[in-house]
Image (spheres, rainbow, N blue to C red):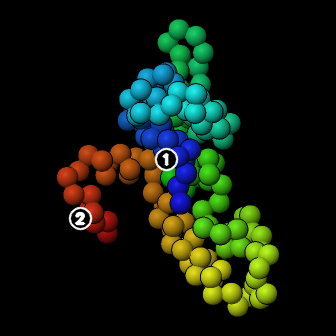
Amino acid sequence: MLTKKGKYGLKAALHLAALPPETTASGAEIAARNHIPKKFLDAILLDLRDAGIVRAKRGPGGGYRLATPPAQIHVGHVIRVLDGPLAPLKCASVSANRPCEDCPNLERCAVRITMGHVRDAMSAILDRMTLEEMIMFSRVRHPDLMYHI
């Protein structure tokens, strides 16, 4: 499940992705326009900056902007930076795998196997989708009817 931190981080990244190239936005502007608590957003933007997703500029005319074009920033990367692994359970995670204490047989655990499939499906979508595509979805009337051949 996406946490508020992940959701707000995506909203902030999308706000920046919608700006003209090299344009910055202040944290206060991003927070106000996206209904995000400013203090919480500051921590999120710091994490995104540390991960190289956004750049920060201080002083007059300063603010935040994306470090790379929106077409090069994958949604899965943003979510992992803010929320950690995509797997619904630690035992189904690829990068942070930890067996459950109550599991007698990790290899045959139907819950772990099923959650591994859920992780794979989420990853297949989120690691392919970019911020640019998310913006495009918000601009079309029926995004579910878009086909990619």
Identify the secondary structure beneath mark 1.
Answer: helix
| Left or right: 26, with 110 as reference point | left
Specify the amino acid type for callout 1.
Lys
Q: Position of residue 133 (x, y in %)?
A: 38, 51
Camera-side residue of 109 and 116: 109
Residue at left offset 58%, top offset 28%: 39
Residue at left offset 58%, top offset 10%: 59
Quickly name the residue at label 2.
145
Disc marking residue 98: none
Quickly name the residue at label 1.
7
**Residue lying at the far left of the rendered structure:** 141
Q: Exactly how many numbered labels are in the figure?
A: 2
Residue at left offset 70%, top offset 68%: 90
Q: Position of residue 149 (x, y in %)?
A: 31, 69
Camera-side residue of 36 and 137: 36
Cα separation, mark 2 vs mark 1, equals 24 Å
Camera-side residue of 22 and 10: 10
Q: Decide which of tag 2 and tag 1 comes sooner along the chain.
A: 1
- When asked about the image quadrant of residue 5, the answer is top right
Q: Is residue 127 above or below residue 115?
A: above
Residue at left offset 46%, top offset 29%: 31
Camera-side residue of 96 and 57: 96
**Residue lying at the far top of the rendered structure:** 60
- Note whether residue 15 is visible: yes
Identify the secondary structure beneath mark 2.
Answer: helix
- When asked about the image quadrant of residue 48, the answer is top right
- When asked about the image quadrant of residue 113, the answer is bottom right
Q: Is residue 18 above or below residue 85?
A: above
Mark 2 vs mark 1: in front: 1
